[in-house]
Amino acid sequence: MSKQRNLYIVFFFTALTVVLTVVVVMTWEKILMTPFYSMVETYYPGDANRVVRWRMQQRFEHIFISTVVDVIVVTLLLRLVGRQQRKLAASEERYRALFEHANDGIVIVSSESRTIIEVNNKFCELFGCRPPELIGQDIAALAWGAPDNGASSDDATNDGGATYDGGGSVDTLSAFLDNSSCADQELSIKTSAGAMLPVSVSCSTLSMDEDRLLVLLVRDWSIRKRLEAEKEEMQRQLFHNEKISALGRVAAQVAHEVKNPLTGLLLYAMHLKSKLSGKLSDSELTLCDRIISSVNHLVGTTEQILSFARPVTLAPRPLDLNGVVRKVVQLLQPQINAYRIEERLELPDTEVIALLDETSITSALINLTLNSIQSMPEGGRLTVKTSRVNGTSQLTIADTGCGMTAEQIEKVFEPFYTTKSQGLGLGMPYAKKVIEQHHGEIHIESRRDAGTQIIIELPAEK
Protein backbone atom coordinates (compact mmCIF):
# COMPACT_ATOMS: atom_id res chain seq x y z
CA MET A 1 0.00 0.00 0.00
CA SER A 2 1.07 3.61 -0.53
CA LYS A 3 1.88 5.89 2.42
CA GLN A 4 -1.10 8.10 1.61
CA ARG A 5 -3.44 5.10 1.70
CA ASN A 6 -1.99 4.02 5.04
CA LEU A 7 -2.59 7.51 6.42
CA TYR A 8 -6.22 7.37 5.28
CA ILE A 9 -6.65 4.04 7.08
CA VAL A 10 -5.22 5.48 10.35
CA PHE A 11 -7.59 8.45 10.18
CA PHE A 12 -10.53 6.18 9.42
CA PHE A 13 -9.97 3.86 12.36
CA THR A 14 -9.29 6.80 14.72
CA ALA A 15 -12.62 8.36 13.78
CA LEU A 16 -14.31 4.97 13.95
CA THR A 17 -12.94 4.43 17.46
CA VAL A 18 -14.28 7.82 18.64
CA VAL A 19 -17.71 7.16 17.11
CA LEU A 20 -17.92 3.66 18.55
CA THR A 21 -16.88 4.93 22.00
CA VAL A 22 -19.66 7.53 21.96
CA VAL A 23 -22.21 4.96 20.81
CA VAL A 24 -21.16 2.39 23.41
CA VAL A 25 -21.16 5.02 26.21
CA MET A 26 -24.64 6.18 25.29
CA THR A 27 -25.84 2.56 25.09
CA TRP A 28 -24.32 1.85 28.50
CA GLU A 29 -25.88 4.84 30.16
CA LYS A 30 -29.37 4.43 28.69
CA ILE A 31 -29.75 0.63 28.80
CA LEU A 32 -27.20 -1.23 30.92
CA MET A 33 -25.95 1.13 33.61
CA THR A 34 -29.14 1.35 35.80
CA PRO A 35 -29.72 -2.47 36.03
CA PHE A 36 -26.04 -3.08 36.77
CA TYR A 37 -25.90 -0.40 39.52
CA SER A 38 -29.05 -1.83 41.11
CA MET A 39 -27.51 -5.32 41.13
CA VAL A 40 -24.33 -4.05 42.79
CA GLU A 41 -26.33 -2.17 45.49
CA THR A 42 -28.26 -5.37 46.19
CA TYR A 43 -25.06 -7.30 46.89
CA TYR A 44 -23.30 -4.44 48.71
CA PRO A 45 -25.97 -2.40 50.59
CA GLY A 46 -25.49 0.44 53.14
CA ASP A 47 -23.13 3.36 53.53
CA ALA A 48 -20.29 1.11 54.67
CA ASN A 49 -20.05 -0.38 51.12
CA ARG A 50 -20.46 2.88 49.22
CA VAL A 51 -16.78 3.05 48.15
CA VAL A 52 -16.77 -0.61 47.11
CA ARG A 53 -19.90 -0.12 45.03
CA TRP A 54 -18.41 2.94 43.33
CA ARG A 55 -15.15 1.17 42.47
CA MET A 56 -16.92 -1.91 41.04
CA GLN A 57 -19.32 0.23 39.02
CA GLN A 58 -16.53 2.43 37.53
CA ARG A 59 -14.13 -0.42 36.78
CA PHE A 60 -16.78 -2.54 35.11
CA GLU A 61 -17.98 0.45 33.13
CA HIS A 62 -14.45 1.19 31.85
CA ILE A 63 -13.75 -2.45 31.06
CA PHE A 64 -17.06 -2.90 29.25
CA ILE A 65 -16.74 0.23 27.11
CA SER A 66 -13.08 -0.34 26.16
CA THR A 67 -13.59 -4.07 25.49
CA VAL A 68 -16.63 -3.55 23.25
CA VAL A 69 -14.93 -0.76 21.29
CA ASP A 70 -11.66 -2.72 20.95
CA VAL A 71 -13.43 -5.91 19.82
CA ILE A 72 -15.39 -4.05 17.12
CA VAL A 73 -12.38 -2.08 15.87
CA VAL A 74 -10.00 -5.05 15.92
CA THR A 75 -12.58 -7.24 14.16
CA LEU A 76 -12.99 -4.69 11.38
CA LEU A 77 -9.24 -4.22 11.15
CA LEU A 78 -8.62 -7.96 10.93
CA ARG A 79 -11.23 -8.29 8.20
CA LEU A 80 -9.52 -5.51 6.25
CA VAL A 81 -6.10 -7.06 6.76
CA GLY A 82 -7.42 -10.50 5.77
CA ARG A 83 -8.92 -9.14 2.56
CA GLN A 84 -5.66 -7.40 1.69
CA GLN A 85 -3.72 -10.59 2.43
CA ARG A 86 -5.99 -12.59 0.14
CA LYS A 87 -5.50 -10.03 -2.62
CA LEU A 88 -1.76 -10.08 -2.03
CA ALA A 89 -1.68 -13.90 -2.06
CA ALA A 90 -3.73 -14.01 -5.29
CA SER A 91 -1.45 -11.41 -6.88
CA GLU A 92 1.65 -13.30 -5.77
CA GLU A 93 0.24 -16.57 -7.08
CA ARG A 94 -0.63 -14.93 -10.39
CA TYR A 95 2.81 -13.41 -10.86
CA ARG A 96 4.48 -16.61 -9.66
CA ALA A 97 2.58 -18.52 -12.34
CA LEU A 98 3.68 -15.99 -14.97
CA PHE A 99 7.25 -16.24 -13.68
CA GLU A 100 7.33 -20.04 -13.69
CA HIS A 101 5.54 -20.53 -17.02
CA ALA A 102 7.44 -17.89 -19.00
CA ASN A 103 8.82 -19.10 -22.33
CA ASP A 104 12.19 -17.53 -21.52
CA GLY A 105 14.52 -18.37 -18.67
CA ILE A 106 14.48 -15.80 -15.85
CA VAL A 107 17.10 -15.59 -13.10
CA ILE A 108 17.22 -12.97 -10.33
CA VAL A 109 20.72 -12.18 -9.07
CA SER A 110 22.01 -10.08 -6.19
CA SER A 111 23.82 -7.04 -7.58
CA GLU A 112 26.51 -7.11 -4.88
CA SER A 113 27.30 -10.80 -4.35
CA ARG A 114 26.24 -11.98 -7.86
CA THR A 115 24.56 -14.99 -6.27
CA ILE A 116 21.35 -16.44 -7.67
CA ILE A 117 18.27 -15.58 -5.60
CA GLU A 118 15.48 -16.98 -7.77
CA VAL A 119 15.13 -18.94 -11.02
CA ASN A 120 12.13 -20.08 -13.02
CA ASN A 121 11.41 -23.47 -14.54
CA LYS A 122 12.55 -22.50 -18.05
CA PHE A 123 15.99 -21.44 -16.84
CA CYS A 124 16.37 -24.75 -14.99
CA GLU A 125 15.16 -26.59 -18.10
CA LEU A 126 17.87 -24.91 -20.19
CA PHE A 127 20.58 -25.98 -17.76
CA GLY A 128 19.03 -29.39 -17.11
CA CYS A 129 18.85 -29.11 -13.31
CA ARG A 130 16.52 -28.26 -10.40
CA PRO A 131 16.07 -24.84 -8.68
CA PRO A 132 17.74 -25.86 -5.36
CA GLU A 133 20.91 -26.69 -7.29
CA LEU A 134 21.14 -23.14 -8.66
CA ILE A 135 19.87 -20.90 -5.86
CA GLY A 136 22.82 -19.53 -3.89
CA GLN A 137 25.32 -20.26 -6.69
CA ASP A 138 27.52 -17.57 -8.22
CA ILE A 139 25.94 -16.71 -11.58
CA ALA A 140 29.40 -16.51 -13.20
CA ALA A 141 30.22 -20.03 -11.99
CA LEU A 142 27.68 -21.54 -14.35
CA ALA A 143 29.00 -22.86 -17.65
CA TRP A 144 28.74 -19.78 -19.84
CA GLY A 145 30.64 -19.77 -23.09
CA ALA A 146 31.27 -17.65 -26.13
CA PRO A 147 28.80 -17.96 -29.05
CA ASP A 148 29.15 -21.29 -30.91
CA ASN A 149 31.71 -22.40 -28.37
CA GLY A 150 32.50 -26.04 -28.93
CA ALA A 151 33.57 -26.74 -25.35
CA SER A 152 34.17 -30.30 -24.36
CA SER A 153 31.58 -32.18 -22.43
CA ASP A 154 34.23 -33.44 -20.01
CA ASP A 155 33.92 -30.39 -17.74
CA ALA A 156 32.99 -31.12 -14.14
CA THR A 157 29.38 -31.53 -13.12
CA ASN A 158 27.86 -31.39 -9.67
CA ASP A 159 25.87 -34.21 -8.16
CA GLY A 160 22.52 -32.70 -9.08
CA GLY A 161 23.23 -32.47 -12.79
CA ALA A 162 23.88 -28.72 -13.12
CA THR A 163 27.08 -28.07 -15.05
CA TYR A 164 29.96 -25.87 -13.99
CA ASP A 165 33.31 -25.13 -15.58
CA GLY A 166 34.97 -22.91 -13.03
CA GLY A 167 33.70 -19.71 -14.53
CA GLY A 168 33.09 -20.13 -18.26
CA SER A 169 33.41 -16.72 -19.90
CA VAL A 170 33.59 -14.96 -16.53
CA ASP A 171 35.07 -11.73 -17.87
CA THR A 172 32.46 -11.45 -20.61
CA LEU A 173 29.57 -12.19 -18.27
CA SER A 174 30.86 -9.90 -15.51
CA ALA A 175 31.24 -7.01 -17.95
CA PHE A 176 27.75 -7.73 -19.22
CA LEU A 177 26.29 -7.66 -15.69
CA ASP A 178 28.17 -4.47 -14.81
CA ASN A 179 26.45 -2.75 -17.73
CA SER A 180 22.90 -3.83 -16.87
CA SER A 181 21.32 -1.50 -19.45
CA CYS A 182 23.22 -3.04 -22.35
CA ALA A 183 21.53 -4.67 -25.33
CA ASP A 184 21.03 -8.38 -25.77
CA GLN A 185 24.19 -10.45 -25.97
CA GLU A 186 24.56 -13.86 -27.55
CA LEU A 187 26.29 -16.45 -25.37
CA SER A 188 26.27 -20.21 -24.94
CA ILE A 189 25.40 -22.28 -21.90
CA LYS A 190 26.57 -25.77 -21.20
CA THR A 191 23.75 -28.16 -20.35
CA SER A 192 23.99 -31.13 -18.03
CA ALA A 193 24.28 -33.33 -21.15
CA GLY A 194 27.48 -31.50 -22.12
CA ALA A 195 26.03 -29.70 -25.17
CA MET A 196 26.59 -26.00 -25.77
CA LEU A 197 23.21 -24.29 -26.22
CA PRO A 198 23.13 -20.86 -27.93
CA VAL A 199 21.15 -18.30 -25.91
CA SER A 200 20.40 -14.58 -25.95
CA VAL A 201 20.87 -12.86 -22.58
CA SER A 202 19.46 -9.47 -21.58
CA CYS A 203 19.81 -7.80 -18.18
CA SER A 204 17.86 -5.16 -16.24
CA THR A 205 17.94 -3.80 -12.68
CA LEU A 206 15.28 -4.07 -10.00
CA SER A 207 15.39 -1.98 -6.81
CA MET A 208 13.78 -3.51 -3.69
CA ASP A 209 14.05 -1.09 -0.71
CA GLU A 210 17.79 -1.06 -0.02
CA ASP A 211 18.57 -4.08 -2.22
CA ARG A 212 19.48 -3.82 -5.90
CA LEU A 213 18.77 -6.91 -7.96
CA LEU A 214 19.69 -7.94 -11.49
CA VAL A 215 17.09 -9.70 -13.64
CA LEU A 216 18.52 -11.82 -16.45
CA LEU A 217 16.29 -12.90 -19.33
CA VAL A 218 17.76 -15.95 -21.09
CA ARG A 219 16.22 -16.92 -24.42
CA ASP A 220 16.86 -20.21 -26.23
CA TRP A 221 18.28 -19.40 -29.67
CA SER A 222 18.66 -22.99 -30.87
CA ILE A 223 15.29 -22.83 -32.64
CA ARG A 224 16.28 -19.57 -34.30
CA LYS A 225 19.61 -21.08 -35.34
CA ARG A 226 17.81 -24.07 -36.81
CA LEU A 227 15.39 -21.83 -38.72
CA GLU A 228 18.32 -19.81 -40.05
CA ALA A 229 20.02 -23.02 -41.20
CA GLU A 230 16.79 -24.15 -42.87
CA LYS A 231 16.49 -20.74 -44.52
CA GLU A 232 20.04 -21.02 -45.85
CA GLU A 233 19.29 -24.51 -47.13
CA MET A 234 16.12 -23.26 -48.85
CA GLN A 235 18.08 -20.39 -50.41
CA ARG A 236 20.74 -22.85 -51.56
CA GLN A 237 18.05 -25.10 -53.02
CA LEU A 238 16.41 -22.10 -54.71
CA PHE A 239 19.75 -21.10 -56.20
CA HIS A 240 20.24 -24.68 -57.38
CA ASN A 241 16.78 -24.70 -58.97
CA GLU A 242 17.53 -21.38 -60.67
CA LYS A 243 20.70 -22.92 -62.10
CA ILE A 244 18.67 -25.86 -63.37
CA SER A 245 16.13 -23.50 -64.90
CA ALA A 246 18.89 -21.52 -66.59
CA LEU A 247 20.36 -24.77 -67.84
CA GLY A 248 17.00 -25.67 -69.35
CA ARG A 249 16.88 -22.42 -71.26
CA VAL A 250 20.45 -22.92 -72.47
CA ALA A 251 19.64 -26.49 -73.50
CA ALA A 252 16.66 -25.33 -75.54
CA GLN A 253 18.92 -22.84 -77.33
CA VAL A 254 21.53 -25.55 -77.86
CA ALA A 255 18.88 -27.85 -79.32
CA HIS A 256 17.87 -25.17 -81.80
CA GLU A 257 21.33 -23.89 -82.71
CA VAL A 258 23.59 -26.94 -82.41
CA LYS A 259 21.74 -30.24 -82.56
CA ASN A 260 20.21 -29.90 -86.01
CA PRO A 261 23.43 -28.68 -87.69
CA LEU A 262 25.36 -31.50 -85.97
CA THR A 263 22.91 -34.06 -87.33
CA GLY A 264 23.34 -32.63 -90.83
CA LEU A 265 27.11 -32.57 -90.42
CA LEU A 266 27.05 -36.23 -89.39
CA LEU A 267 25.03 -37.20 -92.47
CA TYR A 268 27.37 -35.20 -94.74
CA ALA A 269 30.44 -36.88 -93.22
CA MET A 270 28.94 -40.36 -93.65
CA HIS A 271 27.90 -39.53 -97.23
CA LEU A 272 31.37 -38.16 -97.97
CA LYS A 273 32.97 -41.36 -96.67
CA SER A 274 30.73 -43.51 -98.85
CA LYS A 275 31.59 -41.41 -101.96
CA LEU A 276 35.31 -41.57 -101.29
CA SER A 277 35.37 -45.26 -100.43
CA GLY A 278 37.71 -47.02 -102.93
CA LYS A 279 39.15 -43.73 -104.18
CA LEU A 280 41.31 -42.94 -101.16
CA SER A 281 43.72 -44.98 -99.08
CA ASP A 282 42.66 -46.47 -95.77
CA SER A 283 44.75 -43.93 -93.83
CA GLU A 284 42.96 -41.06 -95.57
CA LEU A 285 39.55 -42.65 -94.94
CA THR A 286 40.47 -42.80 -91.26
CA LEU A 287 40.16 -39.01 -91.21
CA CYS A 288 36.50 -39.37 -92.19
CA ASP A 289 36.01 -41.89 -89.34
CA ARG A 290 37.51 -39.38 -86.91
CA ILE A 291 35.17 -36.66 -88.17
CA ILE A 292 32.18 -39.00 -87.73
CA SER A 293 33.36 -40.03 -84.23
CA SER A 294 33.83 -36.41 -83.13
CA VAL A 295 30.40 -35.41 -84.42
CA ASN A 296 28.84 -38.42 -82.65
CA HIS A 297 30.52 -37.32 -79.41
CA LEU A 298 29.10 -33.80 -79.78
CA VAL A 299 25.64 -35.20 -80.54
CA GLY A 300 25.87 -37.42 -77.44
CA THR A 301 26.91 -34.47 -75.27
CA THR A 302 24.00 -32.42 -76.60
CA GLU A 303 21.57 -35.27 -75.92
CA GLN A 304 22.91 -35.62 -72.38
CA ILE A 305 22.33 -31.93 -71.67
CA LEU A 306 18.84 -32.12 -73.15
CA SER A 307 18.01 -35.24 -71.12
CA PHE A 308 19.05 -33.54 -67.89
CA ALA A 309 17.24 -30.25 -68.62
CA ARG A 310 14.09 -31.89 -69.96
CA PRO A 311 11.35 -32.51 -67.33
CA VAL A 312 11.17 -36.16 -66.31
CA THR A 313 7.72 -37.61 -66.95
CA LEU A 314 7.14 -40.62 -64.74
CA ALA A 315 4.74 -43.50 -65.30
CA PRO A 316 5.32 -45.46 -62.09
CA ARG A 317 4.11 -49.00 -61.64
CA PRO A 318 4.98 -51.79 -59.18
CA LEU A 319 8.39 -53.18 -60.18
CA ASP A 320 10.79 -55.64 -58.63
CA LEU A 321 13.94 -53.68 -57.80
CA ASN A 322 15.95 -56.90 -58.11
CA GLY A 323 14.92 -57.23 -61.75
CA VAL A 324 15.95 -53.63 -62.50
CA VAL A 325 19.36 -54.26 -60.91
CA ARG A 326 19.94 -57.41 -62.97
CA LYS A 327 19.03 -55.51 -66.15
CA VAL A 328 21.43 -52.66 -65.35
CA VAL A 329 24.31 -55.03 -64.57
CA GLN A 330 23.64 -56.94 -67.79
CA LEU A 331 23.69 -53.72 -69.86
CA LEU A 332 26.99 -52.69 -68.26
CA GLN A 333 28.61 -56.12 -68.61
CA PRO A 334 31.05 -54.96 -71.33
CA GLN A 335 32.38 -52.18 -69.09
CA ILE A 336 32.57 -54.55 -66.11
CA ASN A 337 34.66 -56.98 -68.14
CA ALA A 338 36.85 -54.24 -69.64
CA TYR A 339 37.73 -52.87 -66.18
CA ARG A 340 38.24 -56.39 -64.76
CA ILE A 341 35.59 -55.82 -62.09
CA GLU A 342 34.40 -58.54 -59.76
CA GLU A 343 30.64 -58.13 -59.49
CA ARG A 344 28.68 -59.28 -56.47
CA LEU A 345 24.87 -59.14 -56.35
CA GLU A 346 23.34 -59.53 -52.90
CA LEU A 347 19.66 -59.79 -53.79
CA PRO A 348 17.08 -61.42 -51.50
CA ASP A 349 15.03 -64.37 -52.69
CA THR A 350 11.81 -62.40 -52.22
CA GLU A 351 10.87 -59.54 -54.48
CA VAL A 352 11.64 -55.96 -53.42
CA ILE A 353 8.65 -54.13 -54.88
CA ALA A 354 8.59 -50.36 -55.38
CA LEU A 355 6.57 -47.92 -57.50
CA LEU A 356 9.05 -47.09 -60.27
CA ASP A 357 9.21 -45.63 -63.74
CA GLU A 358 11.34 -48.31 -65.39
CA THR A 359 12.97 -46.15 -68.08
CA SER A 360 14.08 -43.27 -65.85
CA ILE A 361 15.15 -45.39 -62.88
CA THR A 362 17.17 -47.67 -65.18
CA SER A 363 18.97 -44.65 -66.67
CA ALA A 364 19.69 -43.29 -63.19
CA LEU A 365 21.09 -46.60 -61.95
CA ILE A 366 23.21 -46.96 -65.10
CA ASN A 367 24.82 -43.57 -64.37
CA LEU A 368 25.48 -44.44 -60.73
CA THR A 369 26.83 -47.93 -61.47
CA LEU A 370 28.99 -46.69 -64.33
CA ASN A 371 30.56 -44.09 -62.01
CA SER A 372 31.42 -46.86 -59.55
CA ILE A 373 32.95 -48.97 -62.33
CA GLN A 374 35.03 -46.07 -63.67
CA SER A 375 36.36 -45.33 -60.17
CA MET A 376 38.21 -48.70 -60.33
CA PRO A 377 40.47 -48.44 -63.42
CA GLU A 378 42.83 -51.07 -62.01
CA GLY A 379 40.03 -53.47 -61.15
CA GLY A 380 38.10 -54.00 -57.95
CA ARG A 381 34.84 -55.26 -56.53
CA LEU A 382 31.36 -53.92 -57.29
CA THR A 383 28.64 -54.87 -54.81
CA VAL A 384 24.95 -54.18 -55.45
CA LYS A 385 22.51 -55.01 -52.67
CA THR A 386 18.74 -54.58 -52.22
CA SER A 387 16.63 -54.90 -49.07
CA ARG A 388 13.51 -53.73 -47.26
CA VAL A 389 14.32 -51.36 -44.38
CA ASN A 390 11.67 -49.68 -42.21
CA GLY A 391 9.02 -49.78 -44.90
CA THR A 392 11.31 -48.56 -47.69
CA SER A 393 13.03 -50.32 -50.59
CA GLN A 394 16.77 -49.78 -50.23
CA LEU A 395 19.45 -50.18 -52.88
CA THR A 396 23.17 -49.98 -52.13
CA ILE A 397 25.93 -49.68 -54.74
CA ALA A 398 29.40 -50.13 -53.22
CA ASP A 399 32.82 -50.12 -54.88
CA THR A 400 36.45 -50.46 -53.80
CA GLY A 401 37.65 -47.57 -55.95
CA CYS A 402 39.49 -44.34 -55.27
CA GLY A 403 36.76 -42.86 -53.07
CA MET A 404 35.93 -39.18 -52.61
CA THR A 405 36.86 -36.37 -50.29
CA ALA A 406 34.28 -34.52 -48.18
CA GLU A 407 34.42 -31.60 -50.62
CA GLN A 408 33.77 -33.89 -53.58
CA ILE A 409 30.81 -35.52 -51.81
CA GLU A 410 29.33 -32.07 -51.17
CA LYS A 411 29.63 -31.04 -54.83
CA VAL A 412 29.01 -34.34 -56.58
CA PHE A 413 25.34 -33.56 -57.31
CA GLU A 414 26.05 -30.08 -58.72
CA PRO A 415 25.52 -29.84 -62.50
CA PHE A 416 28.74 -29.86 -64.56
CA TYR A 417 30.92 -30.77 -61.57
CA THR A 418 33.19 -33.66 -62.51
CA THR A 419 36.65 -35.02 -61.73
CA LYS A 420 36.88 -36.89 -65.04
CA SER A 421 38.85 -35.49 -67.95
CA GLN A 422 36.12 -36.53 -70.41
CA GLY A 423 33.09 -36.20 -68.13
CA LEU A 424 30.31 -33.63 -68.47
CA GLY A 425 29.18 -33.77 -64.81
CA LEU A 426 25.49 -34.48 -65.40
CA GLY A 427 25.20 -38.18 -64.59
CA MET A 428 24.99 -37.84 -60.80
CA PRO A 429 22.66 -34.77 -60.84
CA TYR A 430 20.36 -36.57 -63.27
CA ALA A 431 20.26 -39.67 -61.04
CA LYS A 432 19.46 -37.52 -57.98
CA LYS A 433 16.73 -35.72 -59.92
CA VAL A 434 15.08 -39.01 -60.94
CA ILE A 435 15.28 -40.51 -57.44
CA GLU A 436 13.81 -37.40 -55.81
CA GLN A 437 10.95 -37.37 -58.32
CA HIS A 438 10.29 -40.94 -57.15
CA HIS A 439 10.01 -39.41 -53.63
CA GLY A 440 13.20 -41.18 -52.66
CA GLU A 441 16.53 -40.15 -51.17
CA ILE A 442 20.15 -40.74 -52.14
CA HIS A 443 23.15 -40.62 -49.79
CA ILE A 444 26.86 -41.10 -50.38
CA GLU A 445 29.36 -42.49 -47.90
CA SER A 446 32.98 -42.38 -49.01
CA ARG A 447 36.56 -41.84 -47.94
CA ARG A 448 39.60 -41.15 -50.02
CA ASP A 449 41.22 -44.43 -51.24
CA ALA A 450 38.62 -46.43 -49.27
CA GLY A 451 35.82 -46.87 -51.78
CA THR A 452 32.35 -45.38 -52.09
CA GLN A 453 28.91 -46.54 -51.04
CA ILE A 454 25.77 -45.08 -52.62
CA ILE A 455 22.57 -45.68 -50.65
CA ILE A 456 19.21 -45.16 -52.34
CA GLU A 457 15.92 -45.29 -50.43
CA LEU A 458 12.68 -45.55 -52.39
CA PRO A 459 9.10 -45.73 -51.07
CA ALA A 460 8.01 -49.35 -50.97
CA GLU A 461 4.86 -50.37 -52.81
CA LYS A 462 2.13 -51.02 -50.25
Image (cartoon, helix red, strand yellow):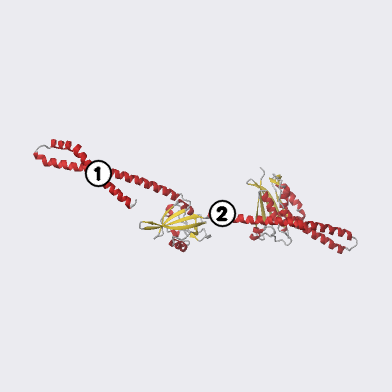
The image quadrant where one finds the C terminus is top right
Q: Secondary structure at mark 1?
A: helix
Q: Secondary structure at mark 2?
A: helix
Nearest the viewer among 245 and 31 is: 31
Name the residue: 16% across, 40% down: 57
Q: Quadrant of residue 284?
A: bottom right
Query: Three-letter amino acid code at disc 1?
Result: Val
Nearest the viewer among 98 and 355 is: 98
Name the residue: 72% across, 61% down: 420
Residue 140 rendering spot, x and y as whole percentages? 44, 60
Q: CA distance from mark 2 to mark 1?
A: 71 Å
Instruction: Identify whether 64 is placed above or below 177.
Output: above
Query: Three-letter amino acid code at disc 2?
Result: Leu
Check if mark 2's residue and mark 1's residue have beta carbons within 8 Å. no
Query: Can residue 63 be seen in the rendering of this structure?
Result: yes
Query: Can residue 413 be seen in the rendering of this structure?
Result: no
Nearest the viewer among 79 and 129 is: 79
Instruction: Identify whether 408 is placed above or below 22.
Output: below
| Direction from residue 62 to residue 138 in the image, left or right | right
Residue 89 rendering spot, x and y as whole percentages? 38, 47
Q: Which residue is mark 2?
A: 227
- Mark found first going from the N terminus, 2 or 1: 1
| Direction from residue 183 to residue 432 in the image, left or right | right
Q: Quadrant of residue 379?
A: bottom right
Residue furthest right as drawn = 279
How many C-alpha atoms fall within 10 Å of the one at disc 1: few (<14), some, or many (≥20)?
Answer: few
Q: Which residue is mark 1?
A: 19
| Direction from residue 145 to residue 343 in the image, left or right | right
Tally the numbered discs: 2
Residue furthest left as drawn = 47
Numbered tag placed on residue 65 in the rendering: none
